[in-house]
Amino acid sequence: MKTAFVTGATAGIGEATVRTLVNAGWRCVATGRRAERLDALVAELGADKVRPAVFDVRDAAAMELAVSSLPDAFAQVDLLVNNAGLAQGLSPAQEANLDDWRTMIDTNVTAMVTLTRLLLPGLIARKGAIVTIGSVAGSYVYPGGNVYAGSKAFANHFTLALRADLHGTGVRVTSIEPGMVETEFTLVRTGSQEASDRLYAGAHPMTGQDIADTIRWIAELPPHLNVNRIELMPVSQDFAGFRVAREG
């Protein structure tokens, strides 16, 4: 039985990924800050299939302790799913809150590279796989995206750089870059359920399950196949929309 390490497993894509992989025969280390949600996954899926690891990914010491204290059944990680991430605020850069920027960088960039580096030796030894959840925002910027878009551009390109560095090791590396997915993302970003409902209303957005199914498909491909990057959007969304500011 193979083992996956899934960050941000208390909601959305991460939660759906744990459930999908376990139902497909995997074990999962499920991480997040909300212990009660991880406990619910354990109760649903079984303590022999899900190992909860409660920590904030911005706390490097807690992350290292969680990794080093994994029991034998979960310690040999075959798949890392770098899913934990967030956006805060939609203000233009000149009005943005610097603490929001730092939180996004610490979560979306620093935590991701720290965990990846921690798990790389084992992933190389086991010829495992790394899947990082980037975003179309890393390719197609939008007003108010500023540091979030920058952090996801980093995630997208760091993942491709890993692919280059891991050449010859047998480790497969994939950047998944979704567009609109209806999760708690907008609620966290805005603090408003109304704003979240308004964004997704009538748009037929993707779901966390859609992305989880994609992760499972990638993870279970034959070991000689690598998906370098995959960009997903709901049919209702596209990447057009250049704007022109006009005088008069």
Image (spheres, rainbow, N blue to C red):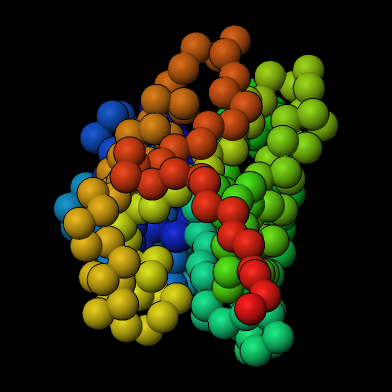
Compared to residue 60, the image places residue 174 above or below, namely above
Q: How many marks?
A: 0
Compared to residue 127, the image places residue 116 above or below, namely below
User: Which residue is at a point 46% across and 26% down the rendered structure image?
Assistant: 218
> Which of the 4 quarters of the picture holds residue 144?
bottom right
Q: Could you tell me residue 10's position as x and y percent?
A: 35, 63
Q: Could you tell me residue 127's position as x and y percent?
A: 64, 24
In terms of depth relative to the viewer, which is nearer, 136 or 24? 136
Q: Could you tell me residue 245's position as x and y percent?
A: 64, 69
User: Which residue is at a point 39% across and 52% down the rendered structure image?
Assistant: 180
Image quadrant containing the N terminus: top left
Left/right of residue 70 with respect to residue 111 in the rendered view: left
In terms of depth relative to the viewer, which is nearer, 70 or 201? 201
User: Which residue is at a point 67% across and 75% down the rendered structure image?
Assistant: 247
> Which of the 4 quarters of the picture holds residue 37?
bottom left
Image quadrant containing the C terminus: bottom right
* Residue 83 appears in the rendering: yes
In terms of depth relative to the viewer, which is nearer, 25 or 73? 25
Q: Could you tell me residue 44's position as x and y percent?
A: 17, 53
